[in-house]
Image: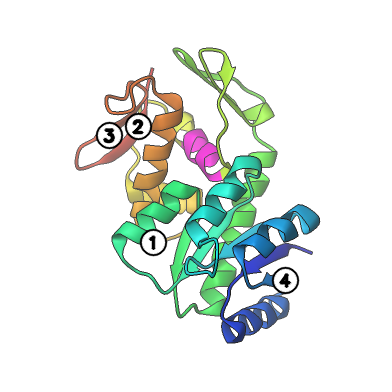
Amino acid sequence: MTAVLLIEDDDRIRLALALALEDEGYTAYAVATAEEGLVEQLRVAADTVLVDLMLPGMDGFECIRQLRRTDDVPIVVISARDDTHDIVAALEAGADDYLIKPVAVKELAARLRALRRRSRVAATPALRVLSFGDLELRPEAGEVRLHGVEVPVTRTEFQLLCELAEHAGQVLSREQLLQRVWGYDIGDERLVDVHVGRLRHKIEDIPSTPRHLVTVRGLGYKLQQ
């Protein structure tokens, strides 16, 4: 059974979401603070973490950053904050997805299923090495290497890079990437843009003038030599 860690300080929302997740077949662990959440994740190693941004003490942004230092677990933000700056900041901190409150349980469950599908694909990739000059993607090991040195990436970043590598030299639109990587027919294209930006800071020598992961204005992104 899939385990989900919920970090939410509102008692009513925390209880309601935990019960709803249990009804959907998940094992739900629920805590009220980021500090508790970090300790709980070390204990239970949940398959997905749901985190609010407005938490007492350590806020959700810092909680995400702390998790990302040691864990590539998929992280979904659930927050009432719908400002573009907050959404982008949460994604840049390391979140994989962002849902705005109030959250429909069926939509949340669909997002969690999409995350599970992506994790399964990442765990069993084709036995190949894909080379782009000084950049190497090793799907069989789930590794990305730049100048021969392994680059730490999240599961979502790895899946995004794999999708672009599978279609090397071909432009993929944001809509196509949302569908293929996140599993959404309709979604927020900022998810794609922010994750591309994060990847560029990891795989490009000069992120502001990328050689490999390039933008084709008005069309989308492509990966090239």
The residue depicted at 41 percent of the width and 27 percent of the height is 168
Give the spatial CA distance, label 2 vs label 4.
38 Å
**Residue 99: x, y in percent?**
46, 68
Q: Above or below — where is 100 with respect to 194?
A: below
Three-letter code for the amino acid on which mark 2 is drawn: Lys
Towards the viewer: 160 or 68: 68
Left or right: where 191 falls relative to 57: left
Q: Give the range drawn in magenta.
A: 156-163
Give the spatial CA distance, label 2 vs label 1.
20 Å
**Residue 69: x, y in percent?**
60, 41
Three-letter code for the amino acid on which mark 4 is drawn: Ala
The residue depicted at 44 percent of the width and 12 percent of the height is 133
Disc 2, disc 4: CB below 8 Å? no
Q: List the residue tagged with mark 2.
A: 222
Disc 4, disc 3: CB below 8 Å? no
The first of marks 4 and 3 along the sequence is 4
Q: List the residue tagged with mark 1.
A: 187
Three-letter code for the amino acid on which mark 1 is drawn: Gly
